Image (spheres, rainbow, N blue to C red):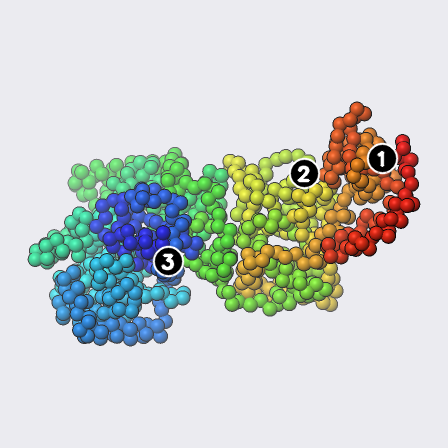
Amino acid sequence: MTLEDLLGRFAEVVEEGDGWVVPCPSHTDSHPSLRLAVSDAGKILLKCRARCETKDVLAALGMTFADLGNVEPGEVKVRATSRDLPVSPALTAALAAKLDKYATATKHPHAEGAIHYAAERFGLSEDDFDRLGLGYADDLGGGPRLVVPFRDRDGVPRGFQARALAADAKVRWIGPENPDGASWAKVGYLPGSAGWDEVLVTEGPGDGLTAVALGYDAILIRGAGLASNALVVETVAEWVGDRTAVVAGDGDASGKAFSSTLATSLVGRGVRTKVLDVPEGLDLTSWRERDPARFAKEAVRAVLSAEEITSYDAALRSRDAKAYPLTDLGNARFVRDYIAARGSGVRYSPEAGFFLLGDGVWRADKLDTTRAYVQEAADLVTAIAADLMAEAGADGNRIKEAKAWAAWARHSQSSRGIDAAVRELQALRDVAADLDAFDRHSHLLAARNGVVNLRTGSLQSHDPELLITRRVDLDYDPKAACPRWESFLREVFPSHADLPAYIRRLVGYGVTGDTSEQCFAVLWGTGANGKSVFTDTLTDVFRELTVTTPFSTFEDRGSGGIPNDLAALKGARLVMAAEGEQGRPMAEAVLKRVTGRDLISARFMRKEFFEFRPAFLLLLATNFKPQFRGQDEGLWRRVKLVPWERYFRPSERDHRLGDTLRGEAAGIFAWAVRGAAEWYAGGLQDPPVIRQATTEYRQTSDALSGFFPGVFVAEEGSKVTGKVLWDAYREWTDDEALPNKERWTRRAFFAALEERGLIKRRITQGMAFEGVRRARQTDAVADHDAPEIDDESRTPDDELALYQDDQSQIAGPSLDDVL
């Protein structure tokens, strides 16, 4: 299914911001209230402004949640959300010229359809059409359109909306694409012809035209969702001034919420305000269509008879007791919407607590801000009670109502009432969330100005539905440069020209959160080599994505405990650990788990256990090589040893380098994104120096090196008893003077032999190992410690023939074999 197919299911489609608004199929909807948008990944996002559950909307559409992720955008262009900043004077002048062109186009015969449409649908005369500067356009897509300018009180154009003239148009209303970093106006002013005191504030441009046809001045708000937008409210209040605002929202749940929210805000700003009683299920335009001959008289009478909202009415509207009953559940629902009205949002996970939406991402509520919101909502109940009591006068019913609010205020402000509201808030359907649902999109990375697709380097708008918990505190600019950073990498790897590009891919892989490489990096080298500058800079640039944990997190502790340090790794993309205790064995099982795809069980202090899949790259920065006892492939295929061999003499050191690199943070961010795209395209591509260093590291880390191979060697078909091997091992550890902490138990020793490929069998004499024999003197000609670099460097088999034949002639029977 394409997005165009989905939009085609609706009778009306209105473009709004970075998406569309359509009639909600889950409830009777006289005016579009279901907001629809599509993410860069093709995921459809749905939100009904009348608070229908998404599952109910999907059921009415005959769809499932799985279908949402399979919709292709097709040919419909999706624009990113822009900021509430005005456009430049140059773009404003260009817009004025375009609107003049559209207005001039109405003089041509082919534009008569627009004039006729305006008269039939909205009741506009030709004089109204010309006075308002309405236009005709056929170059905006979707066929011919009626263009409605959005001007300010001074007549300066600030945007427009264009209505499709065709009844079967897929997108009814469309506007100009927002320029980068700015936004065309969300409100517009249309002057009427009657000079009346009232100013009608409408939900969209269509009803605004209908209001102007009645003779009223009209203020158009581009969508019902903007009723709580502070900038919109301030603009409406300024334009109304000392006159009377008449809020004319639609006669459905969404429209009533629009009228209530906007009216309350305007009264709070000292604006004389009325709410027009629009018939149930209609808007101004459909009200007119019902009976054009009687509409004008009915609408004007409704405006005149509407009562001005008092502070008493405004107090009740600030928390509608029908929508939010005076119960703990009502308090919880009000707090949820109270938080949303402030441009935030709230989610709750039993494993991690509350999350609050801010700067485009969900952040853990570490300061108990959610409880503070509950307290503020309780204060509002107290304020409502006080206002109601002040306005009640001698009216017994009002006094009774005010006392009920006062009693509820006392409960709401008590610890018991606050705790109850918090508990109910945790369980609300659109608040409760599975912790595993957060940070599931590894190829997406949030920044200040949007979300970066690491596969392509493209930028999309923030989307709360993605449930991203961390972001890079920088604007993403793909063209940003970091010349000093790149020269620094060349300086620290002077003998390996291919390492800087490898490091870019490695860091890029890390910020993706993908773990398919199943690896971790050991940044090894003595001091004054640039390691700390490297890790400190990455931590500064990717601070919210980076967790710095003690080296002991990955060392063998020998006992259990609450895995709180592992819990802190949830959501991280880069994990740094530096300088552990020299000679202390590493927790090899933990390293395998955090670099694989297995679930990890952890918990935060005083929280429930939860499971998560690691989504980070581990970087161990150390002056000495960590001690690994194991030799199994499952561990060593994960290790990437990066040698930092350069030593900077005191005279070479730049003590301000850290500050310089922090100044290139935006460029380093773009550098890492390029590395991510390179990794997606071709993988890490370990250069020879990494493969060789890691191979040597593995061989020198073998705790049995010198014993096997050494005292014993591998040979197919041979067999040695466990007792012989164990006795020989103890003798070897004595000869080598190994400290007790480095000597293995019999059980650990046998397990190590199996790890190295020997097969343990039970025999009559006890235990035996197959594939091993005691070394002979002639075995010394083989260099067991020589590392294998790659297959191409090996000596061809035919060149070994003479040596092998010669060896077979001089090799005699072994006394050990006889015994």
**Residue 405: x %, y % from top left:** 27, 39
CB of mark 2 within 8 Å of CB of mark 3?
no
Q: Nearer the viewer, residue 577 or 100?
A: 100
Say the numbered circle drawn on residue 74. 3
Which of the 4 image quarters holds residue 484?
bottom right
Residue at 36% x, 43% y: name it.
64
Amino acid type assigned to the residue bearing label 2 in the image:
Arg
Spatial CA span between label 1 and label 3 = 72 Å
- The answer to whether 270 appears left or right of 803 in the picture is left
- The answer to whether 568 appears left or right of 169 in the picture is right
> Counting residues from the N terminus, which is met first, the one under dot 1 or under dot 2?
2
- The residue indicated by pointer 2 is 557
**Residue 528: x %, y % from top left:** 72, 60
Circle 2 packing at 10 Å, graded few (<14), some (14-19), many (20+), is: few
Amino acid type assigned to the residue bearing label 1 in the image:
Ala
**Residue 106: x %, y % from top left:** 20, 72
- The residue indicated by pointer 1 is 728
Above or below: residue 694 compared with residue 239:
above
